[in-house]
C-alpha cells in the first residue's frame, strides 16, 4: 500500500473513535454464523462497484512483462514517518529485501537519522519487501512489513523518493480495541486496499485469508471502513476500498478478494504474504493479479 493510503487506513484509528462505537456486531465475526468458515467472510449481497474491465473472472491471472532495461539501481531519499503524527521517527532500522520475501539477510539496510530521514540504494522495477523496526526493549514501535513495493523507472541522475511506514506501540494497540477485537499477542494484522483496473478502489468487495490448502485461520477477524474510518458492522469495502484482517497467525498466507458480479460471487484478485507475531503487514490487492505484484507502466516493455 502506498503511504497515503496506509495513512488513510491507520491514522484515523490513532486520532479518534470510529463512527459507530456503540455497535459490537463486528467483535467476533464478519458475517453470518454458519458451519462453513468461508461463509463467515464471503457473504455478498451487493453488486461490485468499480472497474474490472481488464479481467474476466475465472480466467488465468493477468501477466506483465517488465523491460529489463528499466531495472536499474537508483538512490532513494525518503523518510520513516510515524502513522499518528506524520513526523519522522529517529533511529528506525529500515531493511529491504530485493527478492520480495522476508527471508535471510536483507539486501539493503539503513537507519533513519534524528529527523527520520533515510538514504538507500534500491532497484527500480523490482518487487521489494521492507521492514521498519526499533529495538524491542525500547517499546516504541511494532515491526511493520510491506511486501510487493515497486518503484517505477527514473532516468539516471534522478533520485527516487518515498515515505516508509512506522507504527507506534500505541497506534497498534488502538486498532483492535476501536473495532472491539481482542488481539492475541502471537498474531498479526494485515491491511490493504482493493483496487480495480483503473487504479481506483473497489466498493462492495470482501476479503478472506487462506493458507496453501485453502483453510481459514480460526482466529481470523476481518473489518472494513467508511470514509477511511473503521466501522464494526460495515459488511464489505466502501468507496475507500480499505480492509483489515486481524488475529492472523504467523506464516505464509493469501488474502483473496471476492465480489458479486452479474449475480455470481467471483474471485477478482489476491495477494501473497508472510506474517509475523505482533506486527502489521501492508499489502494491496489488484484486480486480475493473484500475488499482489503490480508493476507501473514505466516498468513495462512496449
Image (cartoon, rainbow, N blue to C red):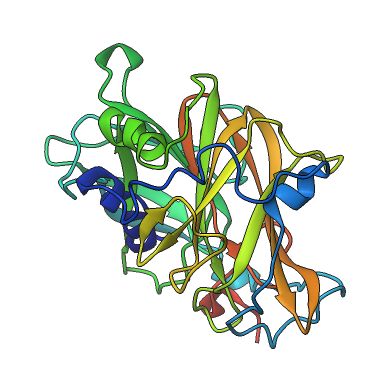
Left or right: 60 in relation to 31: right
Using the image, determine if residue 140 lies above or below residue 6.
above
Using the image, determine if residue 63 lies above or below residue 16.
below
Q: How many marks?
A: 0
**Which residue shows up at 62% across the image and 40% down it?**
101
**Which residue shows up at 43% across the image and 69% down it?**
240
Is residue 54 at least partly visible in the picture? yes
Left or right: 203 in relation to 68: left
Left or right: 5 in relation to 49: left
Left or right: 143 in relation to 140: right
Q: Position of residue 280 (x, y in %)?
A: 46, 37
Q: Residue furthest front?
A: 22
* Relative depth, front residue between 287 and 245: 245
Using the image, determine if residue 71 lies above or below residue 141.
below
Q: Position of residue 187 (x, y in %)?
A: 55, 26
**Which residue shows up at 32% across the image and 69% down it?**
158
Q: Quadrant of residue 176?
A: top left
Q: Quadrant of residue 206?
A: bottom right
Q: Position of residue 195 (x, y in %)?
A: 56, 71
Q: Quadrant of residue 155?
A: bottom left
Q: Position of residue 221 (x, y in %)?
A: 58, 40
Which quadrant does the C terminus fall into? bottom right
Q: Residue furthest top?
A: 137
* Relative depth, front residue between 290 and 157: 290
Q: Residue furthest left?
A: 114
Is residue 255 at least partly visible in the picture? no
**Which residue shows up at 26% across the image and 46% down it?**
83
* Relative depth, front residue between 136 and 176: 176
Using the image, determine if residue 166 lies above or below residue 56.
above
Amino acid at each position: 500500500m502506498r503511504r497515503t493510503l496506509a495513512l488513510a487506513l491507520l491514522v484515523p484509528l490513532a486520532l479518534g473513535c470510529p463512527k459507530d462505537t456503540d455497535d459490537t456486531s463486528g467483535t467476533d465475526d464478519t458475517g453470518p454464523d454458519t458451519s462453513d468458515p468461508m461463509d463467515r467472510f464471503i457473504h455478498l449481497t451487493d453488486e461490485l462497484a468499480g472497474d474490472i474491465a481488464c479481467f474476466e473472472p475465472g480466467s488465468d491471472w493477468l501477466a506483465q512483462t517488465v523491460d529489463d532495461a528499466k531495472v536499474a539501481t537508483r538512490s532513494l531519499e525518503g523518510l520513516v514517518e510515524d502513522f499518528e503524527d506524520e513526523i519522522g521517527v529517529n533511529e528506525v532500522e529500515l531493511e529491504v529485501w530485493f527478492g520480495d520475501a522476508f527471508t535471510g539477510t536483507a539486501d539493503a539496510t539503513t537507519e533513519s537519522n534524528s529527523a527520520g530521514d533515510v538514504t538507500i540504494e534500491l532497484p527500480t522495477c523490482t518487487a521489494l519487501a521492507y521492514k521498519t523496526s526499533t529495538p524491542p526493549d525500547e517499546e516504541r514501535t511494532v515491526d511493520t512489513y510491506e511486501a510487493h513495493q515497486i518503484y517505477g523507472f527514473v532516468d539516471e541522475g534522478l533520485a527516487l523518493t518515498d515515505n516508509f511506514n512506522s507504527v507506534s506501540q500505541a497506534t497498534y494497540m488502538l486498532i483492535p480495541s476501536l473495532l472491539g477485537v481482542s488481539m492475541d499477542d502471537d498474531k498479526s494484522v494485515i491491511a490493504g486496499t482493493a483496487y480495480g483496473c483503473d487504479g481506483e478502489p473497489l466498493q462492495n468487495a470482501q476479503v478472506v485469508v487462506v493458507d496453501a490448502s485453502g483453510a481459514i485461520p480460526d482466529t481470523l477477524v476481518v473489518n472494513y471502513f467508511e470514509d477511511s474510518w473503521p466501522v464494526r458492522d460495515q459488511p464489505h469495502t466502501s468507496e475507500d476500498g480499505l480492509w483489515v484482517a486481524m488475529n492472523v497467525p504467523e506464516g505464509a498466507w493469501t488474502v483473496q478478494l471476492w465480489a458479486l458480479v452479474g449475480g455470481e460471487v467471483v474471485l477478482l484478485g489476491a495477494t501473497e504474504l508472510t506474517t509475523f507475531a505482533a506486527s502489521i503487514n501492508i499489502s494491496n490487492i489488484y484486480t486480475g493479479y493473484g500475488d499482489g505484484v503490480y508493476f507501473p507502466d514505466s516498468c513495462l516493455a512496449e
